[in-house]
Image: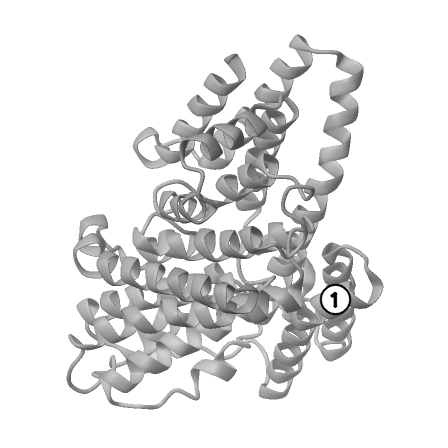
Amino acid sequence: MLLSILFLLGYAAIVLEHPLRLNKSASALITGVVCWTVLVLLGEAHVINEELLHQMGELSGILFFLLGAMTVVELIDAHDGFEVITSRITTTSKKRLFVVVGLTAFFLSAVLDNLTTAIVMMSLLRKLLAGAEDRRYFAGLVIIAANAGGAWSPIGDVTTTMLWVGGQITSANIILKLIIPSLVCLLVPMLIMLLKVKGKVERPQLAPDTVKCAPSSHTERMIVFATGIGVLLFVPVFKSFTHLPPFMGILLGVGVLWVVTEITHKRKNDEEKASLSVARALQRVDTPSVLFFLGILLAIGALQSAGLLTLLAQAMDNAIGNINVITMAIGVTSAVVDNVPLVAAAQGMYSLNSFPTDHYFWEFLAYCAGTGGSILIIGSAAGVAVMGLERIDFFWYVRRISFPALAGYFAGALVYMGMAALIHG
């Protein structure tokens, strides 16, 4: 009981990050350590320590993977590599641009991740759209598209990555089973929102002095972009071929990209190379987010070791019973509560003995947890990032974006259930 209360208090501090003016990473770390401290004081220290070390082995795999992937993305961004994509969008029709932005964010998110994609796409929209209201409306689509695109890829969303690293899903199967439902999750709100998009694109006027010199040449940019994307795409292949954990693949990729950048910039002086180096990319990595994941996953691990998540799973089964309803409820809840602890809790609640790898439940959980956060702007990392970048009001999003996002969420869920019924039926 005490452990549950401490976890709920810590979780409340995470949810109320802005009113409390307390960084959620600090709250998560304190919660994680305090939960394990209480557990070891109330139980057998030797047994609890062994359990903690076992769980840290699994958690470190997730953290090293995130650190490696973030480093690759930051290095591409340092070379302006994403301009390779954004510079090719030249349409002047708002409707056409709306579709292009949505589909680009959808597929880009599957290769990168939803947070990075949201930031890249907002950078693009600032170059393409002069009106703040237009940008906010497009930003709503970017959030939906980035979350939907991340759900069907093992590297597109943290929660899908957690399920992949945890052995609940495999890369090829999750792509095959979720790409259509995820696409429906995007297309339904896109069509609803497209009714309000009219006119021509009004591009912002940039003053001559706002144009900065590119940090790298076009050739260098293409080399780093192609190598970086190749590294990210290589990880699932590496895992399937070697059966080693994904973090080994991403660490190998970081090493290869490190060598490529060193060779590419070997003739430059130290000052020029500094801003384009892996060392600088590591400094720009969002370390507080990595520590947040560590803290919350530690707290969830403590609940799992205490047997509380198993009891919760039994209570939900008894109260609801229908696995589809339970999974969709988790997805809707992720619009209010961060989806990382929700998925971590589900991993602790349901074992691979109950639901083996690539089971219907795990696939549906990946979809629901990945896309449900689009219903509210605070429900996903992509939404929170866009909210800060464009200063979008919470209630503005509720009035204009929440209903299309909710419609897309349930439409994709129905498509997934229908496809599963046809395959297994």
- Left or right: 103 with respect to 254? left
Q: Report whether residue 61 is seen.
A: yes
The answer to whether 363 is drawn above or below residue 418 in the figure is above
Q: Residue at x 39, y 40 (%)?
A: 337
Check disc 1 and report its element: helix, strand or loop: helix
Residue 340: where, in percent of width, then height?
A: 51, 44
Instruction: Out of 210 and 301, give the one closest to the viewer.
Output: 301
The answer to whether 411 is drawn above or below residue 379 in the figure is below
Residue 281: which quarter of the image?
A: bottom right
Residue 326: where, in percent of width, then height?
A: 43, 43
Colouring rule applied to residues: one colour
Tally of marks: 1
- Left or right: 359 with respect to 20? right
Q: Report whether residue 78 is seen.
A: no
The answer to whether 300 is drawn above or below residue 289 in the figure is above
Instruction: Out of 343 and 76, give the one closest to the viewer.
Output: 343
Residue for badge 1: 253
Residue 136: where, in percent of width, then height?
A: 24, 65
Outermost residue on the front side: it is 425
Instruction: Out of 25 and 171, give the one closest to the viewer.
Output: 171
Residue 258: which quarter of the image?
A: bottom right
- Left or right: 275 with respect to 27? right
Residue type at tag 1:
Gly
The answer to whether 128 is drawn above or below residue 307 in the figure is below
Outermost residue on the right side: it is 242
- Left or right: 207 with respect to 308? left
Q: Residue at x 57, y 52 (%)?
A: 362
Residue 347: where, in percent of width, then height?
A: 60, 41
Residue 310: which quarter of the image?
A: top right
Label 1, residues with CA under 10 Å away: few <14, some 14-19, many ≥20 = many
Q: Residue at x 34, y 74 (%)?
A: 187
Q: Residue at x 65, y 39 (%)?
A: 351
